[in-house]
Image: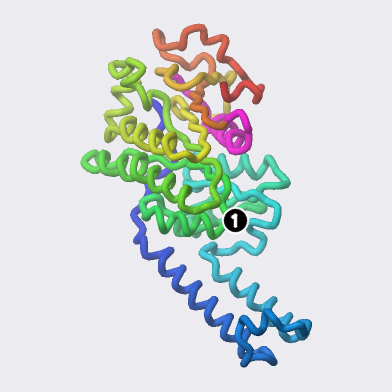
Amino acid sequence: MAACVSSAARLVPSKEFAARARSNARARRAVRHRAMASSPDADTTPAEANLSERPPSRRQTLVSALAASVLASASPLASSPALAAEGKRTVLVVGATGKTGRLVVDELRRRGDADAAVVAAVRSEEKAKKLGVDKGDVELLSGFDVTMSADVLATAMKSVDAEIVVVCTGFVPGNPFKMAAAARAVDNEGVVHLVDAAKRSGTVKRIVLISSILTDGRAMGAEDSPGFKITNAFGGVLDEKLVGERALIDSGVEYCIVRPAGLRGEPPKTELVVTPGNVMASGEVSRELVARVMAEAAFAPGAAGKIVEIAETGTFAPGYEPAEVSRYVVGDDKTRWFP
């Protein structure tokens, strides 16, 4: 079966980030009030203070430092003293507690890019810590849910200066009477929310989206294939993913879409196969390989504007192997990962 990735988003009230924003605003006003009250020139207006030629007193300097500290701690991020350090690009991984999302976070952390900070966007901080998502220098952005409004998500992205967003969400089949609604909420509307949020944030420059082979199966004439029929039976998930993909492609934000074949939890057994979009109709691939491709897509210049489909050699169903598959076998050669 083709990929249904990560965990289905649980509906979290969209008031959460808004409440934090109000709390942050109150904190900023309190800091400004304390700073003025503590200053020897408390009666001076801001305009007059800017025109003053006297150097700041030691007390004023200390108050300014305190204000900066309080403002930093008022951020929606649960705990991030070194987040978005000067000169570093922030990579925000959405769906970081899912099976694939955790591996993507690990892969980005292991890469050790000196100019990149990794932030894991999660719904539950407790769950993320239990799973060890925050290992090493990885920071957590908790209370993040793709079913929230784009404005709320944009505020969260901006709060961590997210420059690259790696989306690892995907609905997980459950109650058969609610699958269609869940697939629409996560793979369609959830992706649309993230794309709109990225545009509104003013900080995001690239989105890497995990999807699935056969997402555009109707266009490639594969709607009668076993893979399409079986996968899309789960809430019409492939049709919902296609809406999300198109929203990203049409957004104007730089993107890379990674479409894995059926996901396996075991380590890779054979070589990586990478094709352009609308080529694969079957196959399987290790989640570890998916994570490596997703992490590479976050930074590789050649990944911009690409849709790639990935599987492992020897996993294609009889009669559904890509034509001339040998030319798509790329293995560990990253220069060929984004044809």
Residue 252, given in percent of the width and then of the height, sits at: 47, 39
Is residue 299 located in the magenta-colored stretch of the structure? yes
Closest to the observer: 335 or 32? 32
Residue range of the region highlighted in magenta in the rendering: 283-303
Q: Quadrant of the N terminus?
A: top left
- Residue 258: image location, x then y, percent: 49, 30
User: Can you give x and y, in whole percent of width and height, for residue 62 in the image?
Assistant: 72, 81
- Tag 1 secondary structure: strand
Q: Is residue 202 above or below residue 53?
A: above
Quadrant containing the C terminus in the rendered view: top right
Colour scheme of the picture? rainbow
Number of dots carrying numbers: 1
Label 1, on which residue? 139
Of 38 and 82, the residue lying toward us: 38
Q: What residue is rendered at 51% in x and 54% in y?
A: 157
Q: Is residue 183 above or below residue 326?
A: below
Task: Write the residue at 52% across / 79% down.
Answer: 29
* Residue sitting farthest toward the left: 177
Q: Amino acid at mark 1?
A: Glu
Residue 275 x %, y %: 51, 19
Vertical placement of 73 versus 45: above or below? above
Tag 1: Cα neighbours inside 10 Å, few (<14), some, or many (≥20)?
many
Residue 125 at least partly seen:
yes
Q: Which residue is painted at 70% across and 47% down in the image?
A: 115
What residue do we see at 56% from left, 9% from top? 326
**Looking at the image, which is closer to me, 131 or 42?**
42
- Secondary structure mainly formed by the magenta segment: helix
In terms of image quadrants, where is residue 65?
Answer: bottom right
Q: Is there any visible trace of residue 99 in the rendered image?
A: no
